[in-house]
Image: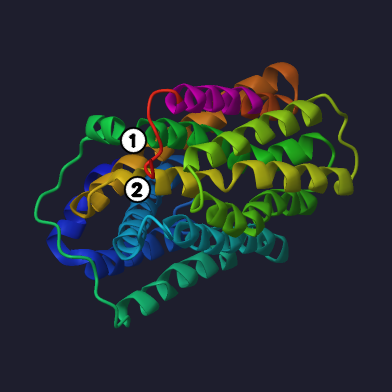
Amino acid sequence: VLGCIGAPYVIMRAGHIRAFAALVSLMSAAAILHPILVEPIAWSLIRVVSGFCLAGFYMIVESWLNEQASNENRGTIMSIYIVLVYTAMTLGQVSITAMDISTFVPFAVASVAVSLAVIPVSLTTANQPAPITVVRFRPAKLYRTSPTALVAVLLIGVTQGGLWMMAPLYAIQIGLSTDNAAFFAATLVGAGALSQWPIGRLSDKMDRRYVLLGLAVTAVIISLIFSTLTISGLGMALMLALMIGVATQPAYAIAASHAYDYADADDYVETSSGLTLAFGIGSAVGPICASLVMARVGPSGLFLQVALVQLVMGGYIVSRLFQRSSLST
């Protein structure tokens, strides 16, 4: 959330490429500090720095991509971007099983990975977006421009934040080993990567709100079914992760594309900032609420929360369909 407010000033001061390089250096340093300062308050502050940098990364990349995209291919382009993000996240989850997390090694690997991210950006021959001269942060304007996108991204943040952070705990609570819990979380994100491109292509051919509604309804049905079943064994757990991943993970790219459809080119950084802020707030609230529900009703509470949040999102989208025609009409 702090990154959504502060990163635009970094971009305004240095431009997209140099801002990206500065944030990479800062996050690389933050990653390597974890094994040096093994203390809860220090780690919390390091996580704040990491979150600030991540928000800046997403803001720079998404605004850059959308400046090159059109309404006819925006869903596809955003989907390819999210596929790459989710694939990398899946590899990150799985890589934990091959490293001793009590050593310096995984933090060094994270620092190296972040440092390497600056190379393609620094060496690109593509034109970077025009420099921004004024930083504007107007969530109210974003809501007026595309209320469906802003509300959907907030609720998607609650859903995905809860799933990403609590999925390993859910897996352990139903009896899976630590390694299998990592595979469970990786399958959830990986399923989103696999389904992202075709769903993004579909959203380029129709009103994106209908695609979001279809994903929400599917997520509600799958969550309610699996919250009533006793999940036993890795195979059944991975099937659950696969299905819920397909239903929930592609939604952000579709909602963001819907927002950019209505935004002016000069407002892309502002739009990205507002969407990242909404997602950040949702993803901070999601794990807290999920943990409270799981503490009360057991591990199935995670998917009861998903069902409830997606039901609210679906209901809001339906209400907006009656209030505003699609962009093409």
Residue displayed at 66% across by 64% down: 95
Which class describes the residues within 10 Å of circle 2: few (<14), some (14-19), or many (20+)?
many
Q: Position of residue 62 (x, y in %)?
A: 36, 57
Q: Are marks 1 and 2 in contact (CB under 8 Å)?
A: yes
Residue 1 vertical position relative to residue 75 in the rendered view, above or below: above
Reply yes or no: does residue 107 show up in magenta. Answer: no
Instruction: Please tell me which of labels 1 and 2 falls first in the chain.
Output: 1
Real-space CA distance between mark 1 and mark 2, rounded to the nearest whole angstrom: 9 Å
Q: Secondary structure at mark 2?
A: helix
Stretch of the chain drawn in magenta: 307-321
Question: Which residue bears the numbered disc 2?
Answer: 261
Q: Position of residue 266 (x, y in %)?
A: 18, 53
Q: Position of residue 15 (x, y in %)?
A: 18, 65
Which numbered circle lies on residue 146?
Answer: 1
Residue displayed at 24% across by 71% down: 128
Which class describes the residues within 10 Å of circle 1: few (<14), some (14-19), or many (20+)?
some
